[in-house]
Image: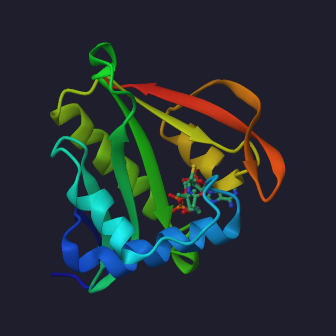
Amino acid sequence: MDDDAIRVRPAVAADLPDIARIYNQGIEDREATLESAPKDEAEVRQALERREPRYEFVVAERGARILGWASLNPYSHRCAYDGVADLSVYVERTARGTGVGSMLLEKLEGRARAHGFHKIVLFTFPFNAAGQALYHKRGFREVGIFREQGRLDGRFIDVMAMEKILD
Ligand SMILES: CC(C)(COP(=O)(O)OP(=O)(O)OC[C@H]1O[C@@H](n2cnc3c(N)ncnc32)[C@H](O)[C@@H]1OP(=O)(O)O)[C@@H](O)C(=O)NCCC(=O)NCCS
């Protein structure tokens, strides 16, 4: 196999340290999530192991190096919303802006369709330039902005809801 090629595949337990490290970079950067405390491997392990199979978790790798991850997450426990998945995507700092996020989303959208999801929603910060560019590129629509929706480091933060119908 070509060692330079990026491959997106289902995450396995051996990926946990890289998944946690990349997630913690996103938490530290304060542009991706309202989470503020770093996650340890045990928390990430729970998130990976306790999910139903249709909520897929994928990683992007080049050779043996994990470059990023993305997951489909439950949106609501209400049956009426079981066609809706929530999305997370995190790329290793040094690999951002090189197409990894686009590849992860393309793969995950395909997997979401295969599992019968009707749409993907996500919640992002309006000031996350890379996230905005990625989601618009992949055809996500702005639903609206919740003003002062979350608190991060003692400050209120606006949160943008976005969606993509999978047809
Ligand atoms: C947001 C994130 C997932 C995007 O993934 P990525 O691999 O960097 O994105 P890509 O390289 O696939 O780029 C996608 C598009 O966004 C554009 N883009 C990437 N970074 C950008 C930036 N900082 N500013 C403006 N546009 C940017 C790219 O040019 C590309 O568009 P193009 O193909 O038309 O040129 C990644 O930057 C990241 O992990 N950031 C930290 C965690 C995070 O914010 N996660 C999202 C939480 S909502």
Question: Which residue is the extreme one toward the top?
Answer: 80
Q: How far across and how far down the image is residue 160, in percent? A: 66, 34
The quarter of the rendering in which ligand 1 is drawn is bottom right
Against 51, is 5 above or below? below
Quadrant in which residue 57 is drawn: bottom left
How many numbered dots are placed on residues in this image?
A: 0
Against 137, is 60 above or below? below
Q: Front-most of 129 and 30?
A: 30
Whether residue 128 sits left or right of residue 153 in the image: it is: left
> Would you say residue 160 is visible in this rendering?
yes
Whether residue 131 sits left or right of residue 122 in the image: it is: right
User: Which quadrant does the N terminus fall into?
Assistant: bottom left
Q: Front-most of 57 and 40?
A: 40
> Would you say residue 5 is visible in this rendering?
no
Q: How far across and how far down the image is residue 151, in percent? A: 75, 47
Whether residue 125 sits left or right of residue 100 in the image: it is: right
Question: Which residue is the extreme one toward the right?
Answer: 155
Against 60, is 145 above or below? above
Q: Residue at x 61, y 50 (%)?
A: 131
Against 167, is 49 above or below? below
Whether residue 63 sits left or right of residue 121 in the image: it is: left
Quadrant in which residue 19 is drawn: bottom left
Q: Residue at x 27, y 60 (%)?
A: 48
Q: Residue at x 66, y 71 (%)?
A: 28
In this picture the colour scheme is rainbow
Q: How far across and how far down the image is residue 95, in percent? A: 52, 75
Quadrant in which residue 59 is drawn: bottom left
